[in-house]
Amino acid sequence: MSRQLAETITFGGDHIRTGVGNDAPARSVLLLEAGRHDRPKPGEVLPAVANGLLRQLGVWTPFAEAGFVENRALVSVWANEVPSERHGMFSAQGAGWQLDRTRFDRLMVQAAKAAGVDTRFGSAVGSAVRDDQGWLLKLADEAIVARAVVWATGRSWRLARCFGAKLTMHGHLAAYTRFFDRAPGDCSMVVEARPEGWWYSADLRVPHRSGSGQRTAQSRTLVPRFSRNAVHRAARAAQRNRDRQHDQGGGNRNDRSRRR
């Protein structure tokens, strides 16, 4: 198995939140991604205060050219039936953005490449252990040694087991997401609390190519929808989480069968 040496390694899609790679020319930085940023993800709202951070990272120009939908207002319904509206025009920072997260992730990876980061997709890290040179990461076909590692895998905890960590669950939440093509939108985000949980919708502008080859945009609305089917799916997912927690706690498989 080949062995490579790097100064800093970042693995996981949340490297985007860390800003690692901004000073890549001054160091040897390797970015490992298990996925390929080719699957749809739920949209997110990026607040206007991120404007300064994007400029600091040197990605403001490509971000502005990407045409992400402005988040002009936030409409929320929590404790009562009266919607509360908060408009960006009354904020000193201005409007934020409603992100197509897959496109945004790809944009940030391209910026990291331009800064000199060695980026690899489809490179899942199997294990991570300390050695006399720093950290030894084992991939499917090679081993990489790094002096520093940035763990940016988000909620994924699989590699934490290499350090003796155990999963602790504080709740049994599950989400159901649905995308609607060519849905009308008003550049606002809606959040509402319901007896079944809470839901939100956001407008995402997804570029595509027309028959003439020109890039155009269509509206896509993201709605985590708590229909009867969604509630059933969420309940099944929560039950699987409870079963997994019970098994890790040394529970009896027969007890789990009786609970079902």
Image (cartoon, rainbow, N blue to C red):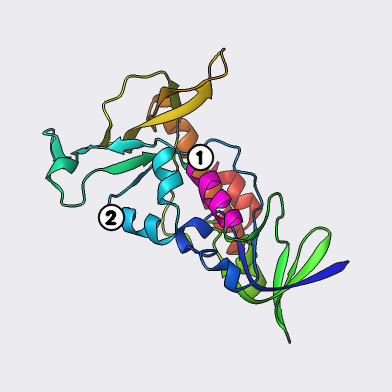
Residue range (magenta): 102-114
Relative vertical location of residue 196 with respect to residue 45 in this rendering, above or below? above
Residue plotted at (57% across, 60% down):
115
* Residue to which mark 2 is pinned: 49
Main SS, magenta region, reads: helix
Relative vertical location of residue 200 with respect to residue 9 in this rendering, above or below? above
Q: Residue 171 location in percent, x, y? A: 41, 54
Q: Residues within 10 Å of mark 1 (few under 14, many from 20)?
A: some
Total number of numbered discs in the rendering: 2
* Residue to which mark 1 is pinned: 103
Q: Is residue 111 magenta?
A: yes
User: Quadrant of the rendered structure where residue 38 is?
Assistant: top right
Q: Residue 113 location in percent, x, y? A: 61, 55
Amino acid type, mark 1 = Arg
Residue plotted at (61% across, 72% down):
149
Determine which of the numbered discs, if any, sits on residue 50 in the image.
none
Alpha carbon distance from label 1 to label 2: 20 Å
Viewer-side residue, 25 vs 9: 25
Q: Residues within 10 Å of mark 2 (few under 14, many from 20)?
A: few
User: Taking 47 as reference, is 249 left or right?
Assistant: right
